[in-house]
Image: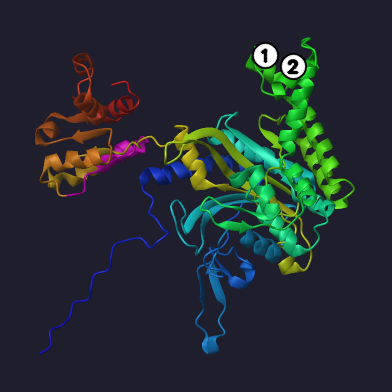
Amino acid sequence: MAKQTKTPRPKAATPKGFRDYFGTDVTERTEMLRRIAEVYDRYGFDALESAAVETVEALGKFLPDVDRPNAGVFAWQEGEEEGKGDWLALRYDLTAPLARVFAQHRNDLPTPYRRYAMGQVWRNEKPGPGRFRQFYQCDADTVGTASMAADAEICAMLADCMEVVGIPRGDYLIRVNNRKVLNGVLDAMGVTEAAQQADVLRTIDKFDKVGEAGVRELLGKGRLDASGAYIDGVGLSAAQAEPVIAFLTAKKTVLQRLHSEWEASPNDGSQDYKVLAWLLNIEMGAGRQKREQHTEASAKLLAKRTLAYLYEIVGDAEQGRKGVEELAQISDLLTAQGYGPDRIVLDPSVVRGLGYYTGPVFEAELTFEILDEKGRKRQFGSVAGGGRYDDLVARFTGQSVPAVGVSIGVDRLLAALREKNRMGGEAVGPVVVTVMDRDRMVDYQAMVAKLRKAGIRAEVYLGNPKSFGNQLKYADKRNSPAAVIEGADEKARGVVQVKDLVLGKKIAENATLQEWKERPSQAEIPRDDLVAHIKALLAGDK
């Protein structure tokens, strides 16, 4: 008789590109999203939960994996006779579903439609360090208005979100650009072919990595990369490339001009001199209150000079001048609301997403420094981005519907908050009621119910109660602040023992004898005083 082979046990491992989230990771993300949702709600945006699964047709042109083209989503075909079932896919972002929702329900929805959405998305991309196939997005969009007030509002709301989650002013900057201005620059260069324009866009997208010199080389004949490989350039002449370089470095050029103006102006203590000094971040010995008095004036000055310089660059290009006009409207709207250059600034060096958006684009950048894996200082970088996209809904309706939105990178923003010690502390576990007699489980459950009704997180130990030491080890592993003990003797006397596990840890580490005497790690109290005692212990009064 043949020996029966055993079915192999499945391997307990997450698939590549996926991960599990435990305790603190989940609660911290939930708390951060709650704070952001409060800001969105305050601005009048409504929550939307759309289906996690969409038809591939509705998703349209999804984001491809560079290494695996046309495999960017998790898709499957519904089982239907003759293979005619719909192709379905997990959503890869929250914007494509919004376009479908608006097109499907446009007769019932208010216009403009203002919605926010938070949820998981999935991308069938090649995973790597810090690059997962399942992650959270947090979006807010306004659909159905071409007013630049909607774009300005998104920028202001994004700044408010940074501060409400714990990124202080001075550690972030919302940078604003406009795709139309770049289109005007391309027109001024004489670059009108779609393929060559796409090449230019891909090149300037590398501005943050290779800098001005690298982009200049790539717009021309090409350059050697870090590995020594030669990268072919776009093939523009030096004269053609110059407007693009001027566009990308506009902020630097404007500040250089302002600095020259400041150096040439007399230090007479005038308002204009102080505004220039504040704007250039030159210490004048003024306090924070006086500095903030210059915010509106400096915002107007910087915007005025930046816009004038952009008009120089685009020349007579109609679309470029339209883009500069839109930036001027956004700047005026933000200045009127009190958002100065210390929070939101016009910056043509913002190039991410220019190939996707049709008008204004913006990016939330964290400006504080962190250490990379090699111990080198670097700026934290971008945690959110967005812009105007006026063509997405047209796929469904045949009509162009203006829209603008922003997406916050949830995991990156959480990482930033941990760097700033705004989150990442050890989570406090529940109070653990130990079991000294398994036949008295009713008593223990009644005890824990009183704690819960008082708003105290608590649980009864539900493992094998045979070893009391294992119960305390469990409480320690749960990071419990206290353990409640009631044996037969305590029951008869109407008391309980409360073991302060936080102090117990502290004593084990470095607590002084005086601290031990003033606050013993275990106390006997009347059972009726349990709730009050635990509350005082959690508040640090015991």
Report if residue 456 lies within the magenta region.
yes
Q: Is residue 22 left or right of residue 335?
A: left
Give the x, y percent position of residue 453: 35, 38
Give the residue type at disc 2. Answer: Lys
Give the x, y percent position of residue 119: 52, 54
Q: Which mark is residue 284?
A: 1
142 is higher (above) or lower (below) than 287: below
419 is higher (above) or lower (below) than 100: above
User: Residues in magenta?
Assistant: 446-463
Report if residue 356 lies within the magenta region.
no
Which residue does the image show at 77% across and 53% down from the upper left? 237
Which residue does the image show at 22% across and 35% down from the upper left? 483
Which residue does the image show at 77% across and 46% down from the upper left? 242
Residue with the mark numbered 2: 274
Give the x, y percent position of residue 434: 19, 40
Evaluate whether residue 435 shows in this view: no
Residue projecting furthest to the right: 316
Give the x, y percent position of residue 187: 83, 54
Dots 1 and 2: beta carbons under 8 Å? yes
In which image quadrant can residue 283 be found? top right
Q: Identify which residue, 206 or 68, lies in the foreground.
A: 206
Please, what secondary structure does the residue beneath circle 2 have?
Answer: helix
In the picture, which quadrant includes the N terminus? Answer: bottom left
